[in-house]
Image (tube, rainbow, N blue to C red):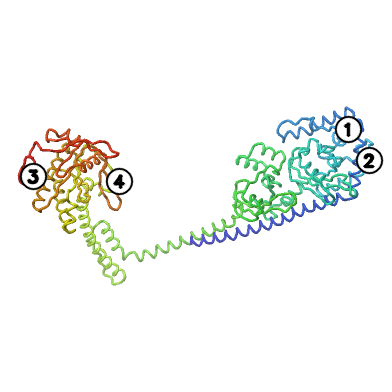
């Protein structure tokens, strides 16, 4: 049931994901067509109007009337009214969104015509800001006002019906001789005026370079000071009278129109986007070009989300001030990056709120703009139906499993009774009682099971006895290889045995002439002779309390005081060496051989431990070992060389003779003493001999 639930859930999620992606892609494609069609309409409309005779005539007349005003005299109270308007209306609002304090003189008009027109149409205009377009004729009886009264209602109607934010007529020198809304960009020169760095200035410059009719330039959104720093985009086209370039027609593109296309007039649910879906535009700078649904529906909640993601406070303030995310909300998601590289696709990503969403993305094909479009929906909402389905299936599966369990328990009670005896016997066996026998009088499967159980117990009994025997043999083998103390530690599971041991004596011996002997006898005889010698040496180690460490060919190494502390470790080692020499001499006599021993002895500190994993070896290391080996190597046949340590400790018991210094390349000089005689009796075989 659980497997079925998982399969159904996975399949349902896959199908639902594909369905939502198809829905988002379909919606994205529809919005793509709408927005591209909208910009194509803007393109064609701007191109058509720039060639319209009314616009051509208006451009000429406004330009002429504007030129006449350049010769006019502007009263001082006009300038005062203009300064008051800029200070109280324009700069106050601009300062809310711009960093620093704007300077009045940088924005106020300078020429006579500009000051005259801004006085009558902007500063002294009785209509409120945003409603200045309602004034047709200020009543100043100027030629400009007569022209304005004839054309303004026509152009205002164009702006209102086509949804433009504003319309501009600009002379060839870059001066705005007419606008519909009469903001502070009216009468401004975009070549050398305060807004010459704006995107409208770029559109005007591009249109001035046009070689003929039919050219249209679209510039991307950018903060526009005359609109108090709000995002603005423009479209511009040159105006020709025949072949003569007479000016430029420009429109400020409507933000609301683009938002209405992307939000479906804020009817997200009706468009199939549920409670969390949205479509939006992003530019090449990773900033939004349309509004965020979440900012529109819940501005305060959206601001808190941005703050939690570490967004700059100034950016959040601007989003709140302008009530839009255009050019303010950064979207650097995987979908945006791939779309900016010209790819389109669908995948699950984290959106600009850092929330998992199903995203469908693609680049837009709009001349002059590098934008991408995305349609997204929260994963939690998209998968809500499948989670509900999973819950229903899981509840049903749980009830079915509970029912099956109850029935199984009832059936089990019927079948378990005959095997209770087997269970009890198995417990006895588990406790180590291998004599347990199951008695069953039935001839059915349970009877066969009882017989098999008894046979198994018999086999276990035999195998247990065999294992015990092998364990005893293994313990004996370990004791033969390692000392009892080391064998005990190994048996307890201690695999990392390493000890620093002080005050031990190390003996190295080597059989002289043995290698030469092996060339003249058979391998079997070689092994037999060596085995006899090593066995005798091993027996001597037990006698003197030494531990054999290893044999290497005809070499023999033993240590005294390693596992068991020996205060007389050096004396025991000397006596052991003397008996080794005596035994080899007797061995030569009995076998008719000419073998001899080289022996080196040193005392000091060593490091001892077990090495290897599969094949264990107990060994010792250190300078004490190395010096004993060097003494053995320098020893003449039939002699015993000891270190200065041994000589200093035992010169009262033995006679030593210094044989000089042992010098080897790269090693320190070593003073060696040869044992000459003993001042005590040493047991050799069945008699005592004074050496």
Q: Nearer the viewer, residue 243 or 156?
A: 243
In the shown orientation, is residue 227 left or right of residue 145?
left
Instruction: Measure the alpha-carbon separation of dots 4 and 2.
Output: 108 Å
> Residue 325 bears which disc, if any?
none
Judged from the image, the secondary structure of the residue bearing numbered disc 4 is loop
Instruction: Measure the alpha-carbon separation of dots 3 and 4.
Output: 40 Å
Foreground tag (2 vs 1): 1
Does 130 sit above or below residue 512? Answer: above
Q: Which residue is under mark 4?
A: 496
Q: Decide: few, some or many residues near mark 2? Use Cα within 10 Å; few <14, some 14-19, many ≥20.
A: some
Label 3–label 1 contact, CB within 8 A: no
Q: Which residue is under mark 2?
A: 146
Image coordinates of residue 661 in percent, x first then y, are 22, 36
Label 4–label 2 contact, CB within 8 A: no
> Residue 112 bears which disc, if any?
1
Instruction: Measure the alpha-carbon separation of dots 2 and 1.
Output: 18 Å
Q: Earlier in the sequence, mark 4 or mark 1?
A: 1
Image coordinates of residue 413 in percent, x first then y, are 36, 63
Does 433 sit above or below residue 606? Answer: below
Instruction: Measure the alpha-carbon separation of dots 4 and 1.
Output: 100 Å
Q: Earlier in the sequence, mark 3 or mark 1?
A: 1
Foreground tag (3 vs 2): 3
Does 650 sit above or below residue 350? Answer: above
Q: Which residue is under mark 3?
A: 684
In the shown orientation, is residue 675 left or right of residue 159?
left
Judged from the image, the secondary structure of the residue bearing numbered disc 3 is strand
């Amino acid at each position: 049931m659980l497997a079925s639930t998982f399969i159904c859930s996975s399949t349902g999620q896959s199908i639902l994901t594909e369905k939502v992606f198809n829905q988002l892609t379909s919606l994205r494609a529809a919005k793509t067509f709408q927005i591209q069609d909208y910009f194509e309409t803007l393109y064609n409309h701007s191109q058509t109007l720039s060639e319209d005779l009314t616009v051509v005539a208006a451009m000429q007349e406004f330009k002429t009337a504007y030129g006449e005003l350049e010769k006019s005299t502007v009263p001082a109270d006009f300038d005062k009214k203009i300064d008051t308007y800029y200070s109280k209306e324009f700069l106050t609002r601009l300062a809310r969104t711009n960093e620093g304090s704007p300077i009045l003189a940088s924005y106020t008009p300078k020429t006579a015509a500009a000051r005259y027109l801004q006085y009558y149409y902007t500063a002294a205009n009785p209509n409120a800001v945003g409603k200045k377009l309602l004034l047709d004729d200020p009543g100043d009886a100027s030629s400009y006002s007569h022209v304005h009264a004839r054309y303004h209602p026509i152009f205002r109607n164009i702006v209102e019906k086509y949804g433009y934010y504003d319309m501009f007529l600009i002379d060839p020198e870059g001066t705005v001789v007419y606008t519909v809304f009469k903001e502070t960009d009216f009468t401004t020169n975009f070549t050398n005026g305060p807004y010459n760095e704006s995107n409208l200035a770029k559109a005007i410059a591009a249109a001035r370079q046009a070689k003929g009719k039919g050219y249209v330039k679209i510039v991307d959104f950018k903060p526009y000071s005359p609109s108090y720093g709000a995002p603005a985009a423009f479209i511009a086209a040159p105006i020709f009278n025949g072949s003569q370039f007479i000016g430029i027609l420009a429109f400020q593109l409507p933000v609301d129109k683009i938002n209405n296309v992307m939000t479906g007039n804020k009817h997200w649910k009706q468009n199939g986007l549920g409670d969390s879906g949205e479509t939006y535009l992003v530019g090449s700078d990773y900033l939004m070009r349309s509004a965020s649904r979440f900012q529109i529906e819940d501005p305060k909640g959206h601001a808190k989300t941005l703050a939690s993601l570490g967004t700059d406070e100034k950016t959040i303030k601007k989003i709140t001030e302008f009530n839009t995310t255009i050019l303010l909300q950064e979207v650097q998601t995987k979908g945006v990056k791939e779309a900016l590289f010209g790819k389109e696709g669908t995948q699950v990503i984290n959106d600009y709120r850092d929330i998992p969403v199903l995203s469908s993305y693609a680049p837009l094909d709009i001349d002059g703009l590098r934008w991408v479009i995305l349609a997204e929906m929260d994963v939690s909402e998209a998968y809500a139906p499948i989670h509900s389905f999973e819950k229903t299936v899981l509840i049903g599966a749980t009830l079915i499993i509970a029912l099956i369990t109850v029935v199984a328990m009832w059936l089990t009670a019927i079948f378990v009774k005959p095997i209770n005896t087997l269970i009890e016997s198995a417990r006895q066996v588990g406790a180590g009682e291998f004599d347990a026998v199951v008695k069953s009088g039935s001839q059915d499967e349970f009877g066969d099971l009882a017989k098999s159980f008894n046979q198994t117990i018999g086999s276990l009994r035999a195998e247990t006895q065999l294992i015990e025997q092998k364990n005893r043999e293994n313990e004996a083998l370990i004791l033969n290889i390692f000392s009892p103390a080391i064998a005990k530690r190994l048996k307890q599971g201690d695999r990392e045995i390493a000890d620093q041991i002080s005050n031990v004596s190390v003996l190295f011996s080597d059989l002289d002439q043995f290698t030469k002997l092996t060339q003249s006898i058979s391998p079997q005889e070689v092994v037999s002779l060596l085995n006899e010698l090593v066995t005798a040496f091993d027996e001597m180690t037990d006698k003197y309390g030494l531990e054999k460490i290893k044999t290497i060919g005809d070499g023999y190494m033993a240590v005294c005081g390693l596992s068991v502390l020996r205060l007389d470790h050096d004396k025991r080692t000397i006596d052991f060496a003397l008996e080794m020499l005596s035994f080899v001499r007797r061995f030569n006599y009995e076998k008719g051989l000419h073998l001899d021993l080289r022996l080196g002895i040193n005392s000091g500190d060593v490091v001892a431990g077990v090495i290897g994993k599969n094949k264990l070896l107990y060994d010792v290391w250190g300078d004490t070992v190395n010096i004993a080996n060097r003494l053995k190597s320098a020893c003449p046949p039939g002699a015993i060389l000891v270190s200065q340590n041994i000589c200093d400790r035992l010169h009262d018991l033995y006679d030593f003779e210094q044989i000089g210094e042992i010098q080897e390349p790269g090693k320190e000089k070593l003073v060696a003493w040869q044992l000459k005689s003993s001042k005590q009796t040493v047991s050799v075989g069945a008699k005592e001999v004074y050496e």
